Amino acid sequence: MVQSERGVVVRAFKAAFPYTLPIFAGFEFLGLTYGMYMNVSGFSFLYPLFMSMLIFAGSMEFITVSLLLTAFNPLQAFLMTLMINARHLFYGLSMLEKFKGLGWKKIYLIYGMCDETFSINFSARIPVDVDRGWFMVFVTALNQVYWVSGATLGGLFGSMITLNTEGIDFAMTAMFVVIFMEQWIRDRDHTSSLLGLALSFVCLLVFGADNFIIPSMIAILLVLTLLRSHLEPRGKVGLA
């Protein structure tokens, strides 16, 4: 790699790393919990190591433990995975423009997109002197490293660790709230944000706390698509 290319990569890493520090705090503890869960369920540390690398979907990885301990049912596993991770369809639609022209990087960015990575890459203010593709690659890679390392350590030392991680998952919720507030402060008009909140609240009332996420995303996507011509000229389409 020539000197100029190395400088581009280093600048992107330095810009991306601070954005991922809140994820590090949550992923290490949650990954540790997952690895410990695999350990006490009778699995070698190799299971959480490779599952966190190849699946990289936190909620589904926890559920996979029970799937591995019950009778093999590929249809059930497929439908459950689709239901739990269907929100990623909407993440992908939201990132179509941002992934344009990124070449091979796009493949890894699609593979490694989780909730937290999507939130950062979608909303981050990337400095003008930082390569957009490398910035998003480092955000994605660092977040995956945090999760894989936590899961592997939990699998290795799970039987010896008595750490109480109850409530640590709230760090993820707090991060999304902070990102929303930053977006609110940044936008001059809050129409799209208010629409997102209102539609989510209506879906919560109609579908309940366990089933409202996918209907909310569908409703938000449809409404913002219909209103796109009115919102886009004024820079209001900030919530996808």
Image (tube, rainbow, N blue to C red):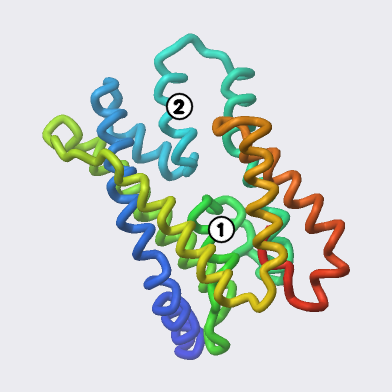
Task: Give the left or right position of residue 91, taking residue 55 as reference.
Answer: right
How far across and how far down the image is residue 175, in percent? 43, 58
The image quadrant that residue 167 belongs to is top left
Q: Against 160, is 56 above or below?
A: below
How far across and how far down the image is residue 146, in percent? 35, 54
Looking at numbered disc 2 in the image, what kind of residue is underneath it? Thr
Between marks 1 and 2, how big is the CA–CA gap? 23 Å
- Residue most extreme to the top: 71
Task: Give the left or right position of residue 200, taking residue 159 as reference.
Answer: right
Q: What residue is at 55 percent from the left and 53 percent from the top? A: 113
The residue mark sitting in front, 1 or 2, is 1
Task: Give the left or right position of residue 165, taking residue 196 as reference.
Answer: left
Q: What residue is at 40 percent from the left and 15 percent from the top? A: 69
Q: What residue is at 29 percent from the left and 21 percent from the top? A: 41
Q: On the image, numbered disc 1 is attached to which residue?
A: 118
The numbered disc on residue 64 is 2
Q: Residues within 10 Å of mark 1 (few under 14, many from 20)?
A: many
Nearer to the camera, 16 or 68: 16
Q: Against 48, is 76 above or below?
A: above
Q: Against 100, is 81 above or below?
A: above
Q: Residues within 10 Å of mark 2 (few under 14, many from 20)?
A: some
Q: What residue is at 35 percent from the left and 36 percent from the top? A: 48
Q: Against 217, is 181 above or below?
A: below
| Secondary structure state at the residue bearing disc 1 | helix
Looking at numbered disc 1 in the image, what kind of residue is underneath it? Phe
Say which quadrant the C terminus sits in. bottom right
The image quadrant that residue 34 belongs to is top left
Q: How many marks?
A: 2
